Image: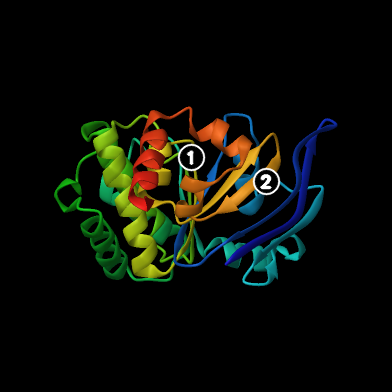
Amino acid sequence: MIEVKNLTKSFEGRKVLDNIHASFDSGKTNLIIGRSGSGKTVLMKAIIGLIRPNEGEILYNARNILAMGKNELNRLRREMGMLFQGSALFDSMTVLENVMFPLDMLSHMTAKERRKRADFCLERVNLSEVHDLYPSEISGGMMKRAAIARAIALQPKYLFCDEPNSGLDPKTALVIDDLIHGITKEYNMTTVVNTHDMNSVVNIGENIIFIKEGVKEWQGTKKQFISSDNAALNDFIFASDLLRKVRELENRHDV
């Protein structure tokens, strides 16, 4: 579990995060949602230690990342996996070499063990057939899956995904959602997904945090999300016809 308490961050006198309290549960897909510029990206960067807040605490299973020394922080970062918005694969490396990269850099495995682990991760995301291809030779969806394989190579306890469906068609986005959700359950990870994709909320949202103008406006489950009477949340989600239709169906079912 990750807990954020009293988190505040300002840039040049402008408050971007304002007294955020939130929890991210183990074994669940935790979604941070909000409009562009709402502060959700800053929140994720603060959680993983790329930005230092002005005030507050960030607790990883009761360990405060803001109070850690360099060595302890480095150990914690080895427990993290990161899926970047643009996949961030190395163009000059094959898919297999990309997945092996964190193993080569941070593990104490033998070359044979690293290859076996990379093979397993690629098999887990259904990419066994593209080991020797380069990122430019595979589709955008395959690149995302390869990036997921790399993110889980070190068997992280925490997985962070920044707009994982960006640039993908709806069908491929659904595959990526299901893969993230399945891996989260399989390895009991604390997964944090930064997104504005309402399809992802409906598909895999288990613990949802809505940020508006730097303030945590709402937190709850998918069921609570669909039936919420929070005005700011409704204003955000009803920009999507999909959510409107889902709520109508839920209401009919309740009747």
Give the residue pinned by disc 1: 195
Residue 88 appearing in the image: no
Q: Which residue is depicted at the point 46% across and 39% down?
A: 163
Farthest residue, direction front: 255
Q: Dot 1: within a 10 Å radius of its alpha carbon, few (fewer than 14), some, or many (20 or more) residues?
A: many
Between 60 and 24, the one lying in front of the other is 24
Quadrant location of residue 175? top left
Relative placement, left or right, of 119 versus 165 is: left
Give the residue pinned by disc 2: 216
Residue 68 appearing in the image: yes
Between 19 and 103, the one lying in front of the other is 19
Residue 108: assigned label: none
- Under mark 2, the amino acid is Lys
Farthest residue, direction right: 13
Quadrant location, the N terminus: bottom right
* Residue 110 percent across, percent down from the top left: 34, 71
* Residue 128 percent across, percent down from the top left: 17, 53
- Under mark 1, the amino acid is Thr
Q: Which residue is depicted at the point 62% across and 35% down?
A: 232
